[in-house]
Amino acid sequence: MTRSQRLSDQQVSKKILLLGAPGSGKGTQGARLAHHLCVEHLAVGDLLRAEITSGSELGETIRSKVESGELVSDDLVLELISTRAAQMGEQGYILDGFPRSVVQAERGREVAELADAVPDVVIYLDVPEDVVVERLLARAAIEGRADDNEETVRNRMRVFRESTAPLLAHYEKQGKVRVVDAVGSPDEVTMEILHIVGMSDGK
Ligand code: AP5
């Protein structure tokens, strides 16, 4: 894996995938990067929670998966992404929470190629498991997110290790992975990512 190496001196990368364990900071960094790069932050977890909150029948199907920490179906997530692909290709994006498996990456690539939305870079937010569990249980006490209880957090970590972590090797073969030490403060992590994508001189 390539740690913190800048992508190019010529161009700012604006098609960015954020990969990382639950609680690694994808949502936090996604919002910050979207602001700095003037692109949309697309967080699949937020889209799924919005569907649950809407009270739709589909939302009820999604709820049971999200609240147990399992992945919702590939078809449903692909549908969510596909409806936004054209805009993502045109304006760039910070995509957080997709793909979560090699199968999703392969199916998503077909959609992305058609829309000129293939990612420039995959930022892997590297945080030890004990730190992310601590973060999520702290958030549970403040926000009460239904999947932030200890049992579900452990299951989310298992799903991450089994289904999502293999994506690193998948994207490494394409030379797209940059690893960021995401234990530092949110500001430090943002600076490091901006440096990688060519937006600032960073640290
Ligand atoms: P999702 O909402 O994406 O949850 P997640 O991946 O488990 O990630 P989190 O939102 O918990 O953490 P994060 O990495 O975004 O960190 P955050 O910035 O919030 O997905 C939820 C569920 O939806 C999945 O379990 C699954 O069921 C379903 N789903 C989603 N995508 C899917 C897909 N593609 N296919 C199928 N199913 C899918 O930070 C966490 C906490 O840490 C916050 O309190 C934050 O303030 C704090 N924090 C962040 N950065 C730092 C820092 N540097 N230092 C200290 N604290 C920090």
Image: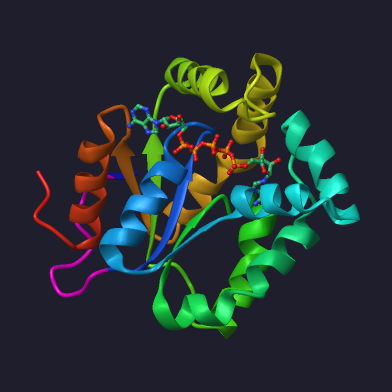
| Relative horizontal placement of residue 11, taking residue 13 as reference (left or right) | left
Question: How many marks do you count on the picture?
Answer: 0
Quarter of the image for residue 149 reads top right
Quarter of the image for residue 140 reads top right
Magenta stretch holds residue 6: yes
Percent of width and height locating residue 76 = 78, 60
Residue toward you, 145 or 109? 145
Residue at x-position 86% and y-position 55%: 56
Q: Is residue 152 above or below residue 121?
A: above
Quarter of the image for residue 83 reads bottom right
Give the magenta range: 3-12
Q: Is residue 194 above or below residue 158?
A: below
Percent of width and height locating residue 143 = 56, 28
Residue at x-position 43% and y-position 52%: 172
Q: Main secondary structure of the magenta part?
A: loop
| Relative horizontal placement of residue 198, taking residue 42 as reference (left or right) | left
Q: Is residue 114 above or below residue 92?
A: below
| Relative horizontal placement of residue 135, taking residue 187 as reference (left or right) | right
